[in-house]
Amino acid sequence: MKEQRNLVLCGMKHCGKSTHGRRLARMRGAEFVDTDERLEALYLERYGEKASCREIFRRHGEEFFRKLEAEVIAGLAETVPGAGSRVTALGGGVPSNALITRDMLRRLGFCIFLEIDAETAFRRVAAGGLPPFLAGAADPEKSFAELYRTRSDFYRRCADLTVPIRGEEPEEAVAARLAAALGER
């Protein structure tokens, strides 16, 4: 078995970062951190109201949202625990955040890009209701495809490992491929 490292999962919205991150954390006996959940908790603590990331973005705009997101990532980068004790799922919009540096992401751990095809990702996103950054687009699917290309390039540059997500494959299959790719059982 390879030495365990802290892991970071990145990828498009609805590619399975939180689902697979929770599973990996359980398998490793590690803490699981979802940066979107941390952002929501920070918002609640600071502003006294519960709101989802989608609501925060819609109410306050992208600049406000990206500042909170960067604050969450910076805090995690400053408090990196011992090797193998944390799995972090990044919000899908991290590539859009100019306040987050590659160095901050590197300090979080070994980065795995969960690469899902654009069509599957869009179907999953649309099924949950279009987020604010797509809802006002004249052609949401085309806007998503452009966003997908830009973000995928970023994820590939940041990733230490890329694991393809094959359509609607079962969680167990993805978990097995992740474990194998990491040299873990």
Image (cartoon, helix red, strand yellow):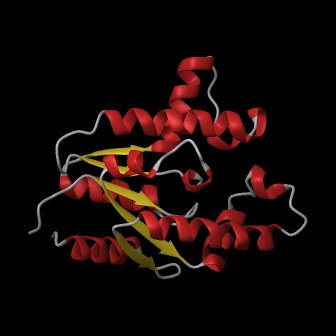
User: Is residue 96 or residue 91 the one in the foreground?
Assistant: 96
Report which quarter residue 174 is drawn in. Answer: bottom left
Q: Residue at x 57, y 18 (%)?
A: 46
Q: Residue at x 55, y 71 (%)?
A: 153
Extreme-left residue of the structure:
1
Q: Position of residue 117 (x, y in %)?
A: 57, 79
Which quadrant of the rendered structure holds the N terminus? bottom left
> Image height check: is 104 above or below 45?
below
Question: What x and y, as percent, mark residue 180?
Answer: 22, 76
Q: How many marks?
A: 0
Question: Residue at horizontal 81%, vertical 67%?
Answer: 140
In the image, is 44 to the left or to the right of 82? right
Image coords of residue 25 (percent x, y): 27, 53
Depicted 178 relative to depicted 17: above or below? below
Q: Is residue 14 left or right of residue 32?
A: right
**The C terminus - image quarter:** bottom left
Which of the pair 100/11 is nearer the observer?
A: 100
Choose between 7 and 135: the one closer to the eye.
7
Residue at the spot 19% in from the left edge and 51% down from the top edge: 84
Between 63 and 115, which is closer to the camera in this rendering? 63
Horizontal side, residue 77 vs residue 40: left or right: left
Does 72 sit above or below residue 140?
A: above
Q: List x then y, in percent, for residue 170.
A: 42, 76
